[in-house]
Image (cartoon, rainbow, N blue to C red):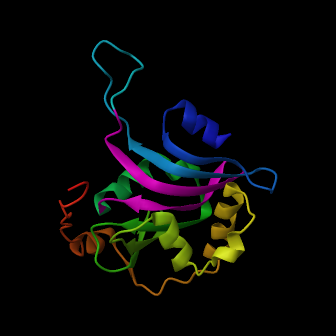
Amino acid sequence: MLLETYQAKGLLTVTLVNGETSTPGVYAYRGDLVLKEGSLRDGSSTDRKPPEALFIHSALLIEHDQIKFINGLLPTLNLLPMFVEKYKADLAADCIALIYVENISKGMQVELAGMTYTLLPFKEGLVWNEILEELYIEKHELKNQSAEDKVAIAYAAAKTYQAKTPVVSYQEAEANTIVVIKDAAVGAI
């Protein structure tokens, strides 16, 4: 199973959901997905430092060991090619990718390795709540559903999602990145 393979390789971290939906053979995951593993600690062949790059707060729906739906947050656009390179073999041909990116100011679609990625600007909040709002999923639709089935509901809604943004080349997307300034005033005063 794909998620077990990822787990064995240390590619899943901060896991919130990892299990089978009510549809047999369909699995859901929510958590962080490792894009670049940390380096090995001195003298170790297995113990790694924390990951260097993550696909944050990701949600995946997996069927027949292929990713059918992926959502989450990339801190910077330049991590998208890293994601594509690492996971492209596991993406279904009809995979729906709705990805928030912190350093873009407007939505766009980018085609990489034969697949279109819908990129959405992200300012603040919870990625899961943002995608539910983007897909017009009401709270009552999720009531009494398992955590895994909530991801399946998001995937079902994403199938009818129509992005109203242009398809641009990755180079054009890079030209539309912005500098993200984080507010340093966080935490206790």
Q: Give the range drawn in magenta.
A: 50-76
Residue 123 falls in image quadrant: bottom left
- Left/right placement of residue 19 relative to residue 119 reads right
Judge whether residue 133 is colored magenta: no
Residue 94 falls in image quadrant: bottom right
Residue 84 falls in image quadrant: bottom left
Q: Where is residue 54 in the image (x, y as percent from the top left)?
A: 38, 48
Q: Position of residue 88 (x, y in %)?
A: 50, 52
Q: Where is residue 93 in the image (x, y as percent from the top left)?
A: 61, 62
- Left/right placement of residue 139 relative to residue 84 reads right
Residue 100 visible to an observer of this rendering: yes
Q: Give whichever of 82, 135 is nearer the camera.
A: 135
Residue 115 visible to an observer of this rendering: no
Q: Look at 80% across and 56% down and name the residue there.
A: 22
User: Residue lying farthest front?
Assistant: 189
Quarter of the image with the N terminus in it: top right
Q: Give whichever of 8, 30 is nearer the camera.
A: 30
Main secondary structure of the magenta stretch: strand
Q: Look at 67% across and 63% down and name the residue there.
A: 150
Q: Where is residue 162 in the image (x, y as percent from the top left)?
A: 55, 84
